[in-house]
Structures are given as structure tokens and as C-alpha cells.
Image (cartoon, rainbow, N blue to C red):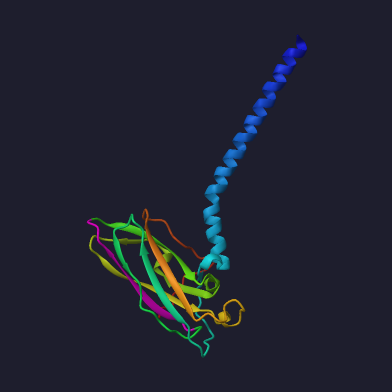
Amino acid sequence: MTDVVQNGQAKRVSNSAIFAGCAVFVAGMVGAAYASVPLYRLFCQVTGYNGTTQRVEQYSEKILDRTIQVTFDANISSGLNWEFKPARMVNPKIGETIQIEYTATNRSPRPTTGSAVFNVTPMEAGAYFNKVECFCFTEQTLQPGETVKMPVVFYVDPEIAKADETKNIKTITLSYTFYPSEPGKPVAALPAGNKAVDKKL
């Protein structure tokens, strides 16, 4: 009889341990799912993977005697009642810092806030596309009917002309998509210890 009781208690302890282990595993997987998005975004920003551009606070000190065509694309998600127009194509010299402007209009009858995600194609060029200033670094709130110019200050790193996978690239496309968001949350931040750029073009 004692053996039966002990076996029953052992099974209950074993089942409890299995249940606790499963609960910890599920909680860990949920936490990993939430953490994967910002970690993946950080990885892309650091490496330029998947066409993610680089955020820098200094201007290029070297300009090559070679131009590269940069085109622009603008998209709006279905949940945001805005009109979003891209800038005109430009042909800067590689290393030359220039400013372009997108245009956004709030077509809704109330103030709305959007945040922009971005990438560069071809994806290999993302690591060499450096943005000094960009409307995508913070959320944008537009009043009803308001139209605003949204500047981007950037340059293409001269190193793009040296790397085997990028030296033959002739055209880069910078693409943005605006999504609705709640105001007050930064979209991109400089690494800790860096100071904001004071110099304007």
C-alpha cells in the first residue's frame, strides 16, 4: 500500500514538473517572439541587411567623381488616410550629401499620426546608404487637411564603389511606407552616447 501511495505521489510530482517546464517554455517562446522584432530591426540597422539604411550623424568627407541615380518610392498602408508623394529622382555624386523632400497630406477629418518604415533596393546597397536626417526617425502627426514637406538628408558611402557586390550598382531606390501609430513613440534612435546633429544643409 505504501508503495502505491509513493508511486502516486511521484507521478504527481513528475506531472507538476512537466507542467511547470512547459509553462516556462511557453513563456520563454512568447518573450522571444516579442523580442525578435526589435532585435531583428537592430540587426538590420547595424548591418544594412534586407536593404535597411544606416543612420549617421556626420557628413561624408570624401566625394567621388562618379554619380549614382537615386529614385524614391512612397506607400501608405490601408489604415492611414494620407496622400504620400515621393521626391524626384536625383543623381548625386557618390559621397555627396544632399537633401530631398517627400510630401504628405492628411485627408482625414481628424489629426492622425503615422510612422514610416523604409528600405533600399538593391538590398546590398542598404549598408552604404547613410541618412543624416529623416522624417522616419520620429512619428509624424498631421492635422486635418494639413500638407507637410518631409526632408531626408543622405549620402551614398564611397565604399560602395569598392565592394565587389555593389561596385556595379547604378541605381538605388529608397522606399518608405507609412503606417498608423499612436503618438509619442520614437521610431529610430541613435546609439547611446551619440549627440543629435546640429548642422543643417
Relative to 128, residue 45 above or below: above
Which of the 4 image quarters holds residue 152? bottom left
Relative to 70, residue 3 above or below: above
The spot of residue 165 in percent (x, y) is 60, 76
Q: Which residues are drawn in magenta?
A: 96-109
Which of the 4 image quarters holds residue 24? top right
The verdict on residue 98 being magenta is yes
Residue at 57%, 40% in the rendered image: 27
Decide if residue 191 is in sight here: no
The verdict on residue 172 being magenta is no
Whether residue 156 sits left or right of residue 113 in the image: it is: right
**Principal secondary structure, stretch drawn in magenta:** strand
Residue placed farthest to the bottom in the image?
Answer: 65
Residue at 48%, 63% in the rendered image: 189
Q: Considering depth in this image, is 85 or 23 the residue closer to the camera?
A: 85
User: How many marks can you see?
Assistant: 0
The spot of residue 140 in percent (x, y) is 35, 62
Residue at 58%, 43% in the rendered image: 29
Residue at 77%, 13% in the rendered image: 3
Quarter of the image with the C terminus is bottom left
Residue placed farthest to the right in the image?
Answer: 3
The spot of residue 194 in percent (x, y) is 53, 68
Decide if residue 167 is in sight here: yes
Relative to 8, residue 93 above or below: below
The spot of residue 26 in percent (x, y) is 58, 39
Quarter of the image with the N terminus is top right
Whether residue 41 sits left or right of residue 139 in the image: it is: right
Whether residue 51 sits left or right of residue 162 in the image: it is: left
